């Protein structure tokens, strides 16, 4: 299936039904008075996250969605039937933006989460509502209000715990194959990965996380160069970034350290907050160098970058050194969870100690 992670659709909520002008006319009941009922409300349009969907490909052809109009009111104070709502299923991780205002309406990050994107128009009041001591036979009723209509942009952002960054041919696809059951395409040419791949890393029972292989980034990605502008959004929700670097590149026109700085610059331009995420350096393709040269080159790269965070030397194709990184990531997540639980317990304890 072709990966589609962005779509623009138009939603039309239903119009409210008009109120009714009617008078009660029954035998033996003189001066029955007004009895026009209200119009029904128009149907609204909702989005609902569904974990069974993985792309937005369904919206390539179905781009317009119209909810049902409300029914007009009737005599004998009968209300018109409300229009049926429409629920549109989208993948979990979909971000919704109003195209006209560029305002983010919200995110659907959990299965079953719902979001109202267009509200149906309210039904008009029947003439029964307009009677008074001065107006015994009102000959007016309210018109139903139009439903909302808008263009909305759907953007799917992968819900992964770990994101792989790196230049094309850094070995990201090989790395995710080594540590998970994902099977992305691997080849010896740039831009092998044309869409993100997800893999589940299972450390042991009930201890696992999701890792995402993002298509290779190049300088200028944030401005539309290469494929990066399409997929940078997918690393926004990750908790840890693994920055893979080919430590023995065939093309030495740009050094490993310069590659790291180039991608850092693209992250900064796209979303400065990404640089605040925990980022670990993974020096890949160590199998192409002997032990001494590998150690010397790794030390030189780390020194040139003045790298303060964790760093590792691996051979993804030989799965050498990859699994210890996964164990450290799982421990990192476990420590985060433990700290969050302790903080919640401290807050609860302080709340309990407050005088009532």
Image (tube, rainbow, N blue to C red):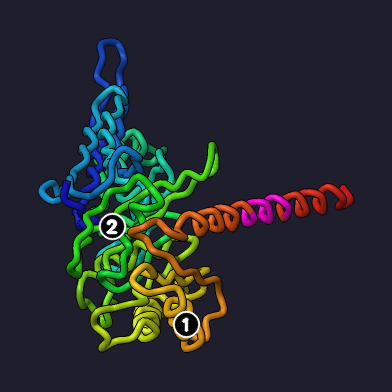
Q: Position of residue 205 (x, y in %)?
A: 53, 37
Residue at 39%, 43% in the rendered image? 114
Residue 341: say if magenta: yes
Stretch in magenta: 335-342
Q: Position of residue 119 (x, y in %)?
A: 32, 47
Image coordinates of residue 293 in percent, x first then y, are: 42, 80
Quarter of the view holding residue 185: bottom left
| Depth order, front residue of 185/332 | 185
- Please tell me whether residue 132 is drawn above or below residue 175 in the rendered image: above
* Residue drawn at point x = 31 percent, y = 26 percent: 77
Q: Residue at x 25, y 34 (%)?
A: 83
Q: Is residue 349 left or right of residue 209?
A: right
* Pick the front one: 51 or 118: 51
Q: Secondary structure at mark 1?
A: helix
Q: Which residue is mark 1?
A: 296
Along the line of sight, which residue is nearer the eye, 97 or 166?
Answer: 166
The answer to whether one can see residue 152 in this image is no
- Would residue 10 be found to the left or right of residue 173 on screen? left
């Amino acid at each position: 299936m072709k990966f589609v992670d962005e779509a623009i659709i138009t939603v039309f909520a239903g119009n409210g039904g008009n109120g009714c002008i009617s008078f009660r006319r029954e035998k033996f009941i003189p001066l029955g008075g007004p009895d026009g009922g209200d119009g029904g409300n128009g149907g609204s349009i909702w989005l609902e996250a569904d974990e069974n969907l993985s792309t937005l490909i369904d919206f390539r052809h179905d781009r317009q969605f119209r909810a049902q109009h409300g029914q007009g009111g009737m005599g004998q104070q009968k209300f018109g039937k409300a229009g049926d709502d429409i629920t549109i299923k989208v993948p979990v991780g979909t971000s919704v933006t109003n195209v006209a205002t560029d305002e983010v309406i919200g995110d659907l990050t959990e299965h079953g989460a719902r979001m109202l994107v267009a509200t149906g128009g309210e039904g008009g009041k029947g003439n029964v509502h307009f009677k008074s001591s001065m107006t015994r036979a009102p000959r007016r009723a309210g018109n139903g209000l139009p439903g909302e209509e808008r263009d909305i942009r759907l953007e799917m952002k992968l819900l992964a715990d770990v994101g792989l960054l790196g230049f094309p041919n850094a070995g990201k696809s090989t790395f995710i194959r080594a540590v998970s059951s994902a099977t992305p395409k691997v080849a010896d040419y740039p831009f092998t990965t044309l869409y993100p791949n997800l893999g589940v890393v299972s450390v042991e029972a009930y201890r696992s996380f999701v890792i995402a292989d993002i298509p290779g980034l190049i300088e200028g990605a944030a401005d539309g160069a290469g494929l990066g502008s399409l997929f940078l959004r997918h690393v926004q929700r990750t908790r840890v970034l693994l920055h893979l670097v080919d430590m023995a590149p065939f093309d030495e026109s740009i050094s490993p350290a310069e590659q790291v700085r180039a991608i850092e610059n693209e992250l900064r331009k796209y979303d400065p907050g990404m640089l605040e995420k925990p980022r670990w350096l993974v020096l890949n393709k160590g199998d192409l160098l002997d032990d001494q040269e590998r150690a010397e080159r790794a030390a030189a790269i780390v020194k040139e970058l003045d790298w303060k965070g964790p760093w590792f030397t691996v051979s993804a194709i030989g799965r050498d050194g990859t699994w210890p990184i996964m164990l450290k990531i799982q421990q990192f997540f476990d420590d985060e969870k433990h700290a969050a639980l302790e903080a919640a317990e401290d807050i609860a304890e302080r709340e309990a100690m407050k005088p009532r």
